[in-house]
Amino acid sequence: MTSLTIKNIPDNLYKKIKQQAKKNRRSINNEVIYMIERSIDQPPVDKAEFLADVRALRKQLNVYLTDETVDRAINEGRP
């Protein structure tokens, strides 16, 4: 089996991986392998289907945001 060395992992990322490994009762090495496999094995997203799902959900929730609504929310409470 091939080995891989990863350098300069940020401390906070390493801590998160370590916590996740402990939670899943895996070694850190096995947790990283699992994470890589999951990310690589994801099927590609069909953009048109994704957007159709988003539009259907927005319609179901009956939430419509206009540029004016977003601008008002951003500027709310600003001097």
Image: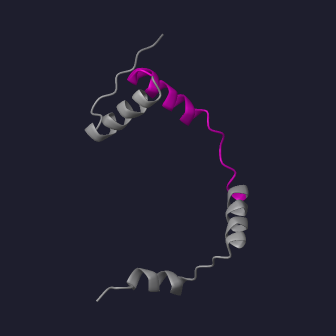
**Is 77 part of what is drawn in magenta?**
no
- The residue sitting at 73% across, 62% down in the picture is 52
Q: Position of residue 71 (x, y in %)?
A: 46, 83
Identify the coloring: one colour
Residue 61, above or below 38? below
Image location (x, y in percent) of residue 61: 67, 71
Percent x, y for residue 79?
28, 89
Residue occupying the far bottom of the picture? 79
Q: Looking at the image, which residue is at 41% across and 15% down?
A: 3
Query: What residue do we see at 63% from left, 79% from top?
Result: 64
Left or right, 46 with respect to 11, comes to right
Side (left or right) of 9 relative to 76: left
**Is 57 in front, or is 68?**
57
Q: Is residue 48 left or right of residue 4?
A: right
Give the vertical position of 62 relative to 52 (above or below): below
On whether residue 45 falls in the magenta region, the answer is yes
Residue extending farthest top: 1
Which portion, as a residue range, is magenta?
26-48
Q: How many marks?
A: 0
Q: Is residue 76 above or below residue 9?
A: below
Residue 4 percent coordinates (x, y): 39, 20
Magenta segment main secondary structure: helix
Location of residue 13 by image quarter: top left
Residue for point 41% across, 80% down: 74
Front residue of 5/13: it is 13
Taking 76 as reference, is 1 left or right? right
